[in-house]
Structures are given as C-alpha cells and as structure tokens.
Amino acid sequence: MLTSDFVRRISPRGALGALLGVCLAALAAYPGDAHAAAPNKAKATTGSVSYGSNSLLGSYLAGHVARSARDSENAALYYRRALQKDPSNSDILDDAFQLDLASGEFESAKTLALRLIKRPGEAAIAYDFLGLDAFKRKDYAKADEYFRLAAKGTSPEEPTMKLARAWVAVAQGQADRAIAILSQPSKAAWATHFETVQRAFVADVAKKKAAAAEAYKTVYEKKPTNMRIAEGYARHLAVWGDRQQALDVLKESGAEETPLGSALAADLKAGRTPKLMVSTVDEGLAETFLGIGQVLASNNGVDAAQIYLRLALYLNPASEIAKLELAEIYGNLEHYHKAVAVLDGIRETSPFRLNAQVRKALYLNALQKTDEATALLAALAEKHPKEESVLQTLASIDSAAKRYEAAIPYYTRVIELIGEPEKRHWSLFYQRGIAYERTKQWAKAEADFKRALDLDPEQGAVLNYLGYSWLDQNINIPEAFELIKKAVRLKPNDGYIIDSLGWGYYIQKDYEQAVKHLDKAVELRPEDPTLNDHLGDVYWRLGRKLEAKFQWTQALSLNPEPEDVVKIKKKLEAGLPDEAGPHAELQTHPEAVPAVASEPQPQETANP
C-alpha cells in the first residue's frame, strides 16, 4: 500500500514519506514509458560484499549497512540470520520481510508474512502480499479477504487495494461489479486517472468493448499523450477489428517510435492481430504494481519501487517493462552486476532486446569489463548496422577508454546515417572533433567543432574546446577569447571553462587577471591535475614560488597524463624558464572578465 506509513517503513532512512504527495500526484501519468538510462558514474560494483559476523548484533548491523547501501539481497540474508537468533523481535521480522520482497525471495517472504499477521498491530503489507499469493494460486476468495484486511491499514484515498479487489471480482466472473467499482470517482484526480486506465484493462479482459473503448478514449485524449496508453488503446482497437484507427493512434501519438509501438505497427501492417496489453487477470493486477513502482522509481522512492516491481514480476514473470525498470534502479544504485542479471532475462525475440543489450554493455563497461562491452556492441552493430544507439554507444565507450582511433569510424557512421543533421546532433560532431583532436588531426577537429557550433551556437563545451585549442596553438587569439568569454557567460560555474579563460590571460602574460580565474577554477574542480598545474604556473610567474610548488605537487598526486608527469616533475626541479615564450602578445588586449564567485555545480566539460 502506498500510505505514508508504508513508504516510510520501507525506507531505512525514513525519507520516503516526504515523497508521498509527489509520487501520488505523479500517478496521473501512469503507465510510464520504459526507457533506457545509462549509468552516470564509472564506479564499479563487482558483486556481493561481506558485511559482518554471525552474532545477533553483527548480523543486524551488517544487515543495516547492506540496507543503507541499497543492497537488498545481502541485507535480507543478514536480517534473516539475525531473526534466527532473536525470533520474537518484531522490528527485525518486519525488516526481513520487506527485504525478502525487495530481493524477490518470495518463499521466505511468505513464511515471514504468515508470522507477521499473527502479531498485534498493523500488518497491512503482509496481508497485501498474502493476498497476491492467494490470487496467484487462484484462491480468489482468500485473496479478497486478505486485500480487505490490508485495506484497513491503508488510506482510503490510496487505490491499490481498491484495484486489487476489482481484479478479484473479474477473476470471480463479476466484471460488471469490477467496472462499477472503478467507475466511482476518487477524491484525488491522480487516483481517478489511474483507476480509469485499470478500468480499460478490466473491460478488455472481460470482453466489454464499449466500456474499454470509453475508458481508453478518456485517458488517451489527456495531454501530453502517454506512449503506453496509446499503445494499449491501439491494441484494443486492433483486437476489436479497427486496424487502421489503431495505426492512426500509433502515428499521431508518436508511439510508433517506441520499441513496442514499432513492433505493433509492423504486426498491424502485416495483417497480424496483436495481443491486448492486458490479457489475463494476473497481468492486470501486475500492471497495478508495475505502474506504482514506475512512479516511485521516477520520484526517487527506490526502496518501495523495488518491492512494487518485484511484486509485478511475481504476478507476471514475463513483464519485460518491469525487468527494464528494475535493471535501471540497480544501475542507478551502481549495482551493475544485478542490473546485468536482470537484463539477461529479456527474451531474444523481445522488442526490448536491443535496448536491453545496449544498456547491458554500458553496465559491463561500468564494471570495467570494457572489452566484453565493446565485443557485445560490435556483435550488435554487425547485426543492426543502421542502429544509431549501438554505434554511438560503441564510440562513447571507446572514447572514454581513450581509444580515439577506434571511436572515429563509429561517430562517422552515425553522422552518415542521420543525413541532414539537426540542432540536437551537435554533440556527435563535438565528440568526433575531440577524437580527431586527440589523434592530432586538427583540421578535421576544427571543422567538426565549427559544425557543432553551426548547429547550436550556445553550447559552452564546444565554445570552450575550440577557443582553448586556438589559444594553445597561438592562433585566432581574439576570436578564441570571445568564444571562451561567451562560454563563461553560458556556464559561469564550470571550472574547466573558467580555467580556459584564466589560461588565456596567462598566455598573454596578464598574470593578475589569470590568477583570479585559475584560483576559481581549482576551487570548482580541485580534483583536476591540469587545473592545479595551471594554477602553479601562474603562482610562479607572480613570484609565489612555494605556492607554485605546492600546486604542482598536488597536480602530480591527481594522476595526470604520462607526458604531463614529465613536465610537472621538471618544473618542480627547476621551476619555469624565463618569460620569453612562444606565444605572441595580443594586438588588442582582451577585456578583463570578473572572476566568478557563485557556488560550484557539477559539470561535464573539460579542457583538451
């Protein structure tokens, strides 16, 4: 149940209760779209970790640590171990039960649920799961009784048990009663919308064409259009014989561009009659938990979302959207090995297979299995030579591994596939430009950077890269300053861009202006060796030689490039040479830009 208390008790930090209002309001968008999400960090999680001892206290603390790390499988193991040593501890029993659900240990969860309902106090979650278990076993009378008991501990505005009991009614041959239950308006708009979607599913399963059509039309006409609702509506239309309207719905909504919508459109054009989105009562009740799980996941309710998605898979093990959502949660938690295991459950013939395999490659790369990731993607590229996502992912992984020569052909193939580029394609030219620059092909790199700016002149990363490269080569100095100053205006908290501006002043021997910006750059990105090296240089020119050596030493500790290590060590030994250098003075001295003093924010741009 999605009551405040339920959500709060699922969270080890008690933080999800505050998300309840946001999550419930967001249910108006249910059902959500399955979409790919690449992991945003490179930190690898390689497998299970041993947290503690076998004592009661050790097991409990180990379970707590694992739970705090969102490692539900290990947490469940340690809480079960603690429960064996203290069987009467209600808190441990409750935690162990929830963690069993989150990790998919349903047999153990059932045993614990039966214990939970015997103790005094609220046991709504246990009744809920036991109701699902009875429903799955087709003991619908028992399921309804459990759901009724669960509803006692649930807010009357929260629809989960109302929906569950409606599906029980359908399973008992009382579809009209179920439709009537779901037609009663709820106090909250989000709940009414959610119940209307479920009413469409119920009517489809019960072969009530008019009721299903009315419910689908109601939710389909709400804007913005939801892709899964559009797909469900199209399936309904096709099954009832209106194939052309089904194709029209897919086209006008944009659903034909999604994996499932594309496959559905192909089936319709080939004269094949598709399945309904929900064909059985088990699939229908599973959709209830899938929808809530998606909303919780999108609103950072990770712990509760895992439970709901696991319950959806308990009722409908074939739900590939539930698997994709669960894999995404694991990926975002950096539990990449678990994400890979879930994705491996996507069948070979699934419309989501390609998406799942690309995502798997990203997770393998995050696990530092780069060769395995690129081999998987290369095989996909051979099988799907015109699939942009595969080629672009290959290029990105090769670039991240500094295999720029290997990355360039993949970027080029993607650029050739898109034909006439649009504004959104600027990053392809930018990334290929970086690869060209790193492989000493400056003419090609410069052309790509300029093309990227033609497509989108407001991209600070491109302005910075091109401007810095010109400064470094002592060419187009006035233009370079203009590009970098524009980049600073667009991204005033980007340490790399501020460093570029400071370095430009350094090259022009305006050390007072340079130190202001280089100081700020290091404040924003203290972990970057190049920025620390630059700050050391300007300190030396200002006669602050002890500070200069400190910054160079700091730069050395931050794992700079091998060629930079040699240069920094030479500076530590002998300092900088005199000021006679290769860079020309500006014919027109650049206008000073005040050093930025606002709070730093994470950025993704970097100097070449």
Image: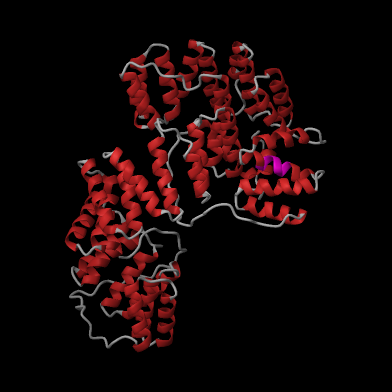
Q: Residue 347 at x, y = what percent?
A: 44, 32
Q: Residue 88 at x, y = what percent?
A: 82, 43
- In the image, what residue occupies the spot 61% across and 20% down? 167
Main SS of the magenta segment?
Answer: helix
Quadrant of the image containing the C terminus: bottom left
Q: What segment carries the magenta color?
A: 94-99
* Residue 110 or residue 42, whichever sits in front: 110
Asked whether 24 falls inside the magenta stretch, the response is no
Query: Height in image: 7 above or below 166?
Result: below
Query: Height in image: 130 above or below 409?
Result: above
Q: Residue 339 at x, y = what percent?
A: 50, 44
In this picture, residue 551 sits left or right of residue 16: left
In this picture, residue 497 sits left or right of residue 4: left
- In the image, what residue occupies the spot 40% across and 35% down? 353
Q: Residue 151 at x, y = what percent?
A: 71, 27
- In the image, what residue occupies the spot 58% across and 43% down? 301
In this picture, residue 557 sits left or right of residue 578: right
- In the image, what residue occupies the spot 27% across and 80% down? 509
In this picture, residue 174 sits left or right of residue 531: right
* Residue 166 or residue 461, whichever sits in front: 166
Quadrant of the image containing the N terminus: top right
Q: Does residue 212 appear in this view? A: yes
Asked whether 95 falls inside the magenta stretch, the response is yes
